[in-house]
Structures are given as C-alpha cells and as structure tokens.
Amino acid sequence: MRKLFSSLLLTVGMSFAHFLVVKPDSDIVRKPVIKVESEFTHPAEGYPAMHYQIERSGVFVNGRIYPIKWQKSYIPAEPGSDLKVEKYTATVRLHGPGVYQIFVEQKPYFEPTEEQFIQQIAKVYVSAFGWEEGWRKPIGLPIEIIPLTRPFGLWEGNTFVGQVLKNGKPVPYARVEIEYYNSKGVKYPNELLYTQVVKTDQNGVFIYTVPWSGWWGFAAITHSGEIKNPSDGKEYPLELDAVVWIYAYPKPQGVK
Ligand SMILES: [Cu+2]
C-alpha cells in the first residue's frame, strides 16, 4: 500500500514539472543564422515530451519583434513510445550585432491530471557578434522573467537572479521551478532532485546558483483566472508560467 502510494505520488509529482523549452544552438554567436528548437517536456528526466501548439512566437531585438517560421516534426514522447508529439525547429536570421530575445507562447492546453489549463511563455537570449546591451529590456509578454544577471556567457557555479513580471508588475512569493536540460541521460539519486524550487521575494525576485554546466530552465508558476473547457463547458483555472533558459559554460581547463 505504501509502495503504491509513493509510486502514485511520484507519478503525480512528475507530471508537475513540465517546461516549455526554447533553445538555440548557442547563446553566443558570430554568425548570421542560428538554429532554434522548441518542445514541451520534462527536462531533468529527459521525457516524456508532450503535445504542444505554438500560439505566438518571435525574435525581439532593438524594440522590434520579427516573426519565426517554425518547422513542425513529430518525436516519440519517450524512447520507444508509439505516442508522437510535436517538436519545432527554425532557422533564425540575425540582423547584425545585438542581444536577441527568442520567445514562444504555448497555446493553453487542458491538463486532466491537474484539472487546469496550462500556458507557458518561454524565452532565451542570444548575444550576436559580441553585443551585450539590451538584455534588461522586457519584451512585454503577459508574463515574463526579467534577468538581473546577464543571461548569456555564464559559468557553472554562477548565481542567476531574475524578476518575475506579470502584466509589467512584479509577482511576489511565486514558486520558481528549476531544471537541468538532461540530454545526457544523467541519473538522479532521488526524484526530489529533478526539480529545484525557490520562491520570489516581495519584489518578485528569485535567486539560484547553477551547480553544473548545461542548459537550465526557470519556470515561474502563477495562476491567472479561468478558461472554459469546450469539452465539458466548465471553467477551469489557468496556470500561467514564465520560463527562461540560460546556458552555463563548464569551468575552463586548469581551474577548480
Ligand atoms: Cu508534463
């Protein structure tokens, strides 16, 4: 019984930490064209990936938003699975030096295990041709994490600080979930280690020290009214989350 209960808990817990991923081939580039990919998954476990549709997306630079043309493909939800889910890839043209903010808004979807709708809005920064200015500028998304640490060119062991804004106002005491994008099949000794959790303070500011190199996602969880589910006509709460991705570089050779 106890075993059943804990495996049930594990399943429920696992279903919580979904992250909308938006990931360029590099956060610092010196080339005019980059590749970007997007999926909706459980990054620390590596799977399962889930169905997801893009509602809106773009590249924000110098106060303007440029469209992104996505190519949709289908990948197995997990290794060996017959269930195929969407993965999006795009080539993005950069218009010279700048800090490019690439964002994706997920179309809200109904999550039956949580009896609510979920919508995540994710972004990532790319510094092109040595440019460093502009990362503090909000895109103006419905919910957005504004970095207080420069969000590119980070070392492992750096502390990342961000502020969560909803409709331009800080979100106090929000839960922020943090996961490593585990493309290497790294094994975790305990399921509680998949997702790290911090809270924002009264000004919507959170702090986290990145323990090792790789892509790391931060998801600020908030609740934002209700949406009607067309399948049963009932209203359900909408979880509206802001996600940001950063890359931490490994320590250079010769340092400890
Ligand atoms: Cu999920």
Image (cartoon, grey):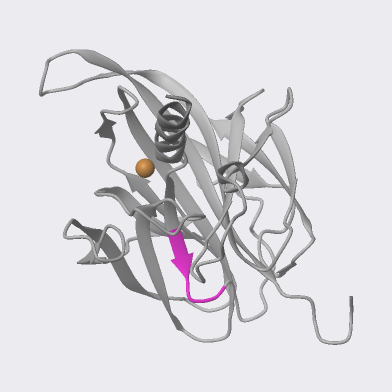
Residue at the farthest front position: 1
On the question of residue 167 being in view, the answer is no
In this rendering, the answer to whether 129 lies above or below 143 is below
Residue at 46 percent of width and 36 percent of height? 10
Left or right: residue 232 versus residue 189 is left
Range drawn in magenta: 22-26
Q: Where's residue 237, x and y in %?
A: 34, 18
Q: Where's residue 180, x and y in %?
A: 58, 57
In this rendering, the answer to whether 90 lies above or below 174 is below
Residue at 73 percent of width and 46 percent of height? 208
Quadrant in which ligand 1 is drawn: top left
Residue 8 drawn in magenta: no
Q: Where's residue 191, x and y in %?
A: 55, 45
- Between 173 and 42, the one nearer to me in the picture: 42
Residue at the farthest top position: 234
Q: Main secondary structure of the magenta part?
A: strand
Q: Where's residue 162, x and y in %?
A: 68, 43
Left or right: residue 56 versus residue 192 is left
Left or right: residue 154 versus residue 238 is right
